[in-house]
Image (cartoon, helix red, strand yellow):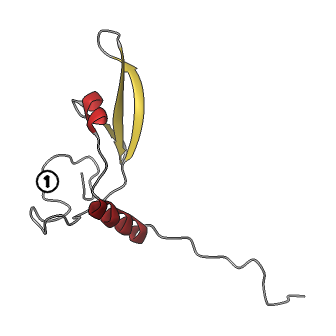
Amino acid sequence: MFGTNSRVMGNTKQGGPDQGEPGKLANIAEVRFYGIKFYDVEGRAQTAVVMEFGDQYYMPPNAIEWAAAARPCTKSLSEQIRSRLSSAISKPAEVPTSDAVDVD
């Protein structure tokens, strides 16, 4: 999922080593989640969560059960995620609202 090719999924060597410090965040990328309602092959309405990563959409085989089983991250991991995201997102430069130079 990580690396330059957004279509790579599964166990890859991209994005970091296979082992690291327990509880430490290795990598992060933006993934958007969408709740969807769709009709299965038998025409029955189903509700699930899909992920948008790059230009692809992914749905786990157990998407309905997976969404129902989701739980909050630990406080430590949540703090690491917030920290990494805040340092990764560039903030726009402040533009002055008035100019100190008079131009005639």
- Figure check: 37 above or below 49: above
x and y, in percent, of residue 51 in the image:
34, 40
Q: Residues within 10 Å of mark 1 (few under 14, many from 20)?
A: few
x and y, in percent, of residue 36 in the image:
41, 29
Quarter holding residue 81 = bottom left
Looking at this view, name the residue that lies furthest to the bottom: 101
Q: Residue at x 75, y 77 (%)?
A: 97
Is residue 7 visible in the rendered image? The answer is yes
- Figure check: 39 above or below 63: above
Pick the front one: 65 or 103: 65
Pick the front one: 8 or 32: 32
Q: Which residue is mark 1?
A: 12
Provide the secondary structure element on which disc 1 rests: loop
Q: Residue at x 18, y 64 (%)?
A: 23
Q: Residue at x 39, y 68 (%)?
A: 88
Q: Residue at x 90, y 88 (%)?
A: 104
x and y, in percent, of residue 59 in the image:
28, 34
The type of residue carrying mark 1 is Thr
x and y, in percent, of residue 47 in the image:
37, 24
Pick the front one: 94 or 9: 94
Q: How many marks?
A: 1
- Figure check: 100 above or below 64: below
Looking at this view, name the residue that lies furthest to the left: 19
Looking at this view, name the residue that lies furthest to the right: 104
Is residue 59 visible in the rendered image? The answer is no
Looking at this view, name the residue that lies furthest to the front: 75
